Image (cartoon, grey):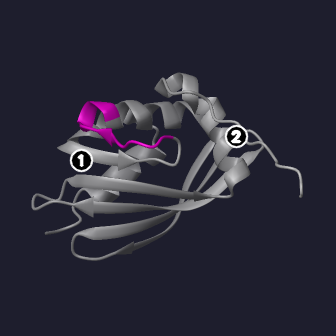
């Protein structure tokens, strides 16, 4: 197994070219997002979410890649307005090198919620709200 689709996929993300993403994704790809409980499943659903992400953020930057034979950790930084997150996308590829799974892990929580609120209407999910609890 080789990571032959990982770099072209990232290149398409940086070029903000969502139409070019599909060819690098397995038809049954899953995307686990910090925005929702259940993963997005299938190429069309994942491309729809990635298209919304690219439309809704101001900056998407890969800061490092650690890759093995069939798995890569993509370190990144994303900014939408004043909200900024850093994180890791855990990417797994199949026998043909196409991406079969992506698990998104971002921080800090306040940044996740702020970006999620901006993307929620684009993805069709309810917006989250961060509520600070009083100290007891």
Q: Which residue is mark 2?
A: 114
Q: Nearer the viewer, residue 10 or 107?
A: 107
Residue 119 falls in image quadrant: top right
Q: Position of residue 89 (x, y in %)?
A: 44, 59
As drawn, the residue found furthest toward the left would be: 95
Q: Residues within 10 Å of mark 2 (few under 14, many from 20)?
A: many
Q: Earlier in the sequence, mark 1 or mark 2?
A: 1
Q: Is residue 76 above or below residue 66?
A: above
Name the residue at 62% across, 45% down.
Answer: 59
Left or right position of 95 against 15? left
Answer whether residue 50 is magenta in the image.
no
User: Which numbered circle lies on residue 56?
Assistant: none
Q: Which residue is mark 1?
A: 24
Total marks shown come to 2
Q: Position of residue 14 (x, y in %)?
A: 47, 47
Left or right position of 112 against 46? right
Answer whether residue 40 is magenta in the image.
yes
Q: What is the secondary structure assignment of the residue under circle 2?
A: helix
Name the residue at 39% across, 63% down.
Answer: 90
Q: Disc 1 to disc 2, how far (Cα)?
A: 29 Å
Quadrant placement of the N terminus: bottom left
Magenta region: which residues? 36-45
Name the residue at 24% across, 54% down.
Answer: 99
**Do the residues under discs 1 and 2 have CB atoms within 8 angstroms?**
no
Q: What is the secondary structure assignment of the residue under circle 1?
A: helix
């Amino acid at each position: 197994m080789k990571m032959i689709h990982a770099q072209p996929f990232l290149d398409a993300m940086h070029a903000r070219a969502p139409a070019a993403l599909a060819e690098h994704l397995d038809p049954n790809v899953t995307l686990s997002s910090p925005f929702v409980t259940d993963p997005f499943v299938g190429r069309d659903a994942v491309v729809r979410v990635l298209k919304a992400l690219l439309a809704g953020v101001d900056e998407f930057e890969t800061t490092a890649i650690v890759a093995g034979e069939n798995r890569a950790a993509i370190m990144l930084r994303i900014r939408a307005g004043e909200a900024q997150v850093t994180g890791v996308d855990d990417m797994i590829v199949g026998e043909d090198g196409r991406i079969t799974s992506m698990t998104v892990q971002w921080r800090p929580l306040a940044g996740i919620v702020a970006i999620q609120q901006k993307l929620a209407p684009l993805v069709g999910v309810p917006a989250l709200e961060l509520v600070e609890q009083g100290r007891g």
